[in-house]
Each structure stands twice: as C-alpha cells, then as structure tokens.
Amino acid sequence: MENSEQIPLSYSKRWRLWYSSYITSNLSAGLLNPMIPLFISIYFDKSVIFVGIASSLSSISSVIALILWGNISDNVKKRKIFVLIGFAGSFASLFMIAFISTIYEYLAILVLYQFFAMASVPVSTLLVIENEQESQWARVVSSFSAISTIGTVFGLAFGLLIVVENPNSVGIVKNIYIIASIFYLISFFLALFLLKESEKKIRRSAIPDIFSLRAFERTRYAPTYVIHIVKLFGRKSTEKMSGQLRLYLFICALLMLGFQLFFTPYPILLIDNFRASE
C-alpha cells in the first residue's frame, strides 16, 4: 500500500456524495436485468438458443474486461478515469441499440456494453476504502453496497411500470435500453463533478493473504460487490481454508450453476408455453 496515512473523517464524509453516481448506474442495471431474453424473444422473435448465446458472449466479455481494467487501474494508479470510462462507454453502447436492425448487431453491442461497463467495477470498492479510515472499511463498504443496490431495486420497479403502462408494445423494449443509457449519462456527470481521485492507493496484490474476486450471479447485476477471500491459487497463503469454507464455496458454485441453467430458458418458457406478456 502507498500513502497509508489516516484520512480525515470530515474529508471522507464529503466523498460519499459520489455514491449517487452508482445509484443511477445501478438503476440502469435494474432496468436491463431481464432485457436479454425479452429483447431477443419479443423484438427479434428468436429462440432460446440466441438467449444462451447472448448471455454467454456478454459474460465472456465482462470477465476479460474485468481482468484488463483491474490490471490497468493498478498499474497506472488511477481510479476516477475508469469510472468515467465505464459510465460513458455504457451510455454510448446502449444508445446505439436505437439504430440496430439485426440480432447480430445486438449481440455485438452487448459485448461492447459489457466491456465498457466493467471499467468501473474493479475500482468501485477500492475508491471506497482508499478514502476512508481503515477502521471504517467494513462499515462503509456495506453502506456503499446497500446504497447502490437501492438503484437496482428502483430500476426493476421502474422497468415494471414502463411495461405495465405500455402493454403489448414491441417497441418499448428498445426504448428501455435508451432510457437505461440516459441514466448512465447522468451517472457520468455525477461522477465527473462529485468524484475526486483518491490520494491513497491500495494495490490489490499488496494486501497480505487475500485477493479481490469479483463474483456475480449474472453480469447484469454489476457493478456492485467484491468478495475478499483467502487465496485459493498462486502464491502461498499463511492461512488454510477450513473444510466448512470449502463446502460452502462448492455449494455456492452449485447453486449458481443451477440458477444459470434455469435462468436462460425460463422467460422463453413463460412466453412460448404460457403466453406471458412482457
């Protein structure tokens, strides 16, 4: 770690205004949560095969982007610029959906969106802890996660309101993407004016015996959470993982596998077999 001196508490409190940019960006994430299967099945009238392809491509793009953006951030020792890239890139890529005409253009934009959206993910929690006293880390990270998740909940509710007010409207699913892009643009300006570059820098690899692992139930829940766990691979660890922790991680992996198998065909099942609306 560099510049590890204490951060004045009054200064760190002023920093928390930038949390609002993650409320609005997560509002976009809430709007987009169910959009891949809905857009492919309703707008393009394609099968569940394309839903699986779209989910896979966007997930692959996000994994590659997370590794890339996280390493670049640590190497250049900058944070704010990656938040701005994430929000601006998300706005630009989502707004392009207004002009697409084929599903292949849609798939390409999904990949582009995931790539840019992940730029803000590896730095979010680091920004929180780099501008807080170490004794406050656990509390402020929890507060940041809770506050930003409020945006996701409101996004889901807002999306529901939109489709309820526009029943059986094929065009509305494209408009939801445009609305989500506007919220990313709002997030960009909030971060531009409220977020300041942190003076203290914490390099993930410099934290003893732990590393940062991004874990998502689905990439559309990004960007929110970081889980810090004992190192599983690579460098030697001074702590051994308990049998209970190994079992817990295995069960979580099994749960996520089952959920992904369920999630991909479920909306299509409702639409095709039970004539469900949006």
Image: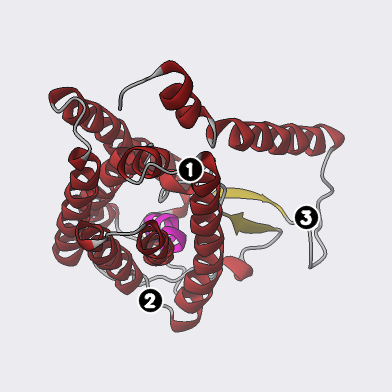
Circle 3 Cα neighbour tier, 10 Å, few/some/many (<14 / 14–19 / ≥20): few
Which residue is denoted by mark 2 in the rendering?
78
Which residue is denoted by mark 1 in the rendering?
138
Question: Which sits earlier in the primary sequence, circle 3 or circle 1?
Answer: 1
Residue type at numbered disc 1: Ala
| Disc nearest the viewer among 3 and 1 | 3
User: What count of labels does the image hold?
Assistant: 3
Q: Is residue 122 magenta?
A: yes
Magenta segment: 121-129
Q: Residue furthest bottom?
A: 76
Q: Is residue 183 left or right of residue 142?
A: left
Q: Considering depth in this image, is 243 or 65 the residue closer to the camera?
A: 65
Circle 2 Cα neighbour tier, 10 Å, few/some/many (<14 / 14–19 / ≥20): some
Instruction: Look at the picture and state if 94 lies above or below 40.
Output: below
Residue type at numbered disc 2: Lys
Q: Is residue 55 left or right of residue 182?
A: right
Image coordinates of residue 67 in percent, x first then y, are 56, 68
In the rendered structure, find residue 232 and report the number of the disc placed on it: 3
Image coordinates of residue 153 in percent, x first then y, are 31, 31
Question: Which sits earlier in the primary sequence, circle 2 or circle 3?
Answer: 2
Instruction: Look at the picture and state if 101 lies above or below 16.
Output: below
